Amino acid sequence: MTQKMVLPHDHGNNSKDILESMPSDQIIEAVSSAMKQLGDPSRLRIFWFLCHCEECVINIASVTGLTSPAVSHHLRLLKTSGLIVSRRSGKEMYYKAADTELAQALHHMIEEVGRISCPQIVNH
């Protein structure tokens, strides 16, 4: 917080100590934005998928049953919120989860809440 907050009432709990650790408005906004994006089932599915692999729009559309334009729309929103990144290879764009603490924490949270295990990747 930008200024020290004072609570009007002291109830004898540790509220004052907790306020000292309150995340900044900027951090709260970033987390809120990311969680808002994952509130959509299609974006949640896409994000979870991209946490485990890097893929192109066509393959993401095939996995999700969405059209390529719909997938592109969802990818744009996920990218804007900092949850995924992209790279170009020739004419193809590839997407994967961002390598950030926020993206990793949200990935972990999705799997914990959904009781989903990460797939075991076998390299051939």
Image (cartoon, rainbow, N blue to C red):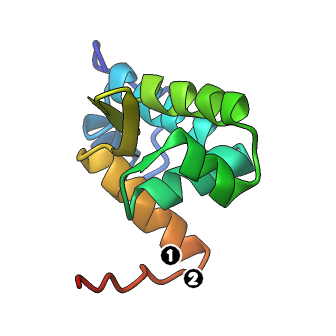
Q: List the residue tagged with mark 1.
A: 112
**Against 98, is 51 above or below?**
below
Could you tell me residue 76's position as x and y percent? 53, 25
Tell me the number on the disc at residue 20. Answer: none
Residues at circles 1 and 2 in contact by the CB criterion of under 8 Å:
yes
- Left-right relation of 67 to 18: right
In this view of the protein, which residue sits in the foreground, 67 or 92?
A: 92
Q: What type is the residue that disc 1 sits on?
A: Glu
Other residues around mark 1 within 10 Å, as few (<14) / some (14–19) / many (≥20): few
Q: What type is the residue that disc 2 sits on?
A: Arg
Other residues around mark 2 within 10 Å, as few (<14) / some (14–19) / many (≥20): few
Kindly give the residue lying farthest to the front in the view shown: 90
User: Which residue is pictured at 38% across the width and 64% down the height?
Assistant: 52
Could you tell me residue 14's position as x and y percent? 36, 52
Q: Is residue 5 something that shows in the picture?
A: no
Q: List the residue tagged with mark 2.
A: 115
In this view of the protein, which residue sits in the foreground, 62 or 76?
A: 62
Could you tell me residue 60's position as x and y percent? 58, 50
Q: Is residue 11 something that shows in the picture?
A: yes
User: Which residue is pictured at 50% across the width and 72% down the height?
Assistant: 111
Kindly give the residue lying farthest to the top in the view shown: 3
In this view of the protein, which residue sits in the foreground, 107 or 70?
A: 70
User: Which residue is pictured at 32% across the width and 56% down the height?
Assistant: 104
Badge 2 element:
loop
Could you tell me residue 117's position as x and y percent? 47, 84
**Against 48, is 39 above or below?**
above
Q: Quadrant of residue 64?
A: bottom right
Q: Quadrant of residue 23?
A: top left
